[in-house]
Amino acid sequence: MFSPVSSLLNIMIKYPFFSCPGFKVVVEEDSDAVLPCLISTKEDITGKLFDWKKDGQKEVFMYDSGLHYNNGRTGQDKQFKGRVSHFQDQLMNGNASIKIQNVKMADSGIYSCIFPRLQPSQTFNIQLVVEQLLRDRSGEIPAASPEPYITILDETEDGSLLQCKVRGASPEPKVEWQDSSGNILPAEEPQVSERGGRYYVTINTTVTKTGRYRCVVTQEEISHHTSAETFVFISGEISVLMFYSSNEFNSA
């Protein structure tokens, strides 16, 4: 009977190193990525040559009988200097995998693990996908929104009117008010204007409880996220608390 597993084993026996089309490694930005590369015969490759390239051109990591980019070999692309290592103790098991530290969006691409001296030479291709995280990128991207500006427009015993302004952001940001627990607060319709491709946003909200409040700005297209926070004291809350405490005392 035909078995996909047995067919795969036959392929691995016939071709001790083979390419797996569509193999993908997905990691989050700023984490480490391990790209697997293993000879199925598990023969010792300590004395062999293997070469990792990105998109068929950039030199990522080369190992040749103990000499590699981390111990004196030259030629590594500057994008990967000091960030790529292999698993020395696994070479005896045919493991040519590498680890890329602190991955960035620019590291996404097709990586090839090449054994050029095998007869015939063999190549294993892997796609690395780096998922971008929402974070403050104002120091990296000129059009990213700066930290928003918060103003307390009005204060009464019963509440405070808060205003948040975002200036010169592109693309158009999403701006919202949140409480200290991250709950989105009801707010007035944002006032949005555009000048020279940059967006200016103003959004107001009224709060009635003492606490910390945050204006949050998000630009998902560029994975940018920033915020500002303020503390609001509502004096009427204390008066109400004292009123109830006094009533409880008098009725005791």
Image: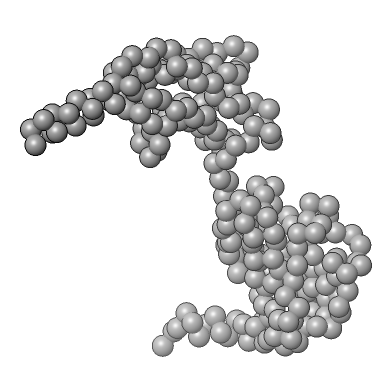
- Image quadrant holding the C terminus, namely top left
Residue 2 pos. (x, y %):
44, 84
Residue 29 pos. (x, y %):
61, 51
Note whether 109 is above or below 124 in the view shown: above
Residue 129 pos. (x, y %):
60, 54
Residue 124 pos. (x, y %):
68, 69
Q: What is the image's colouring?
A: one colour
Does residue 234 appear in this view? yes
The image quadrant of residue 55 is: bottom right
Instruction: Decide which of 218, 216 is in the foreground and name it.
Output: 216
Q: Residue at x 83, y 52 (%)?
A: 78
Q: Residue at x 60, y 69 (%)?
A: 20
Q: Residue at x 69, y 59 (%)?
A: 101
Does residue 108 appear in this view? no
Instruction: Decide which of 85, 5 is in the foreground and name it.
Output: 85
Q: Residue at x 28, y 21 (%)?
A: 236
Total numbered circles: 0
Q: Is residue 204 left or right of residue 249?
A: right
Instruction: Decide which of 213, 131 is in the foreground and name it.
Output: 213
Note whether 115 is above or below 176 in the view shown: below
- Image quadrant holding the N terminus, namely bottom left
Note whether 92 is above or below 171 in the view shown: below
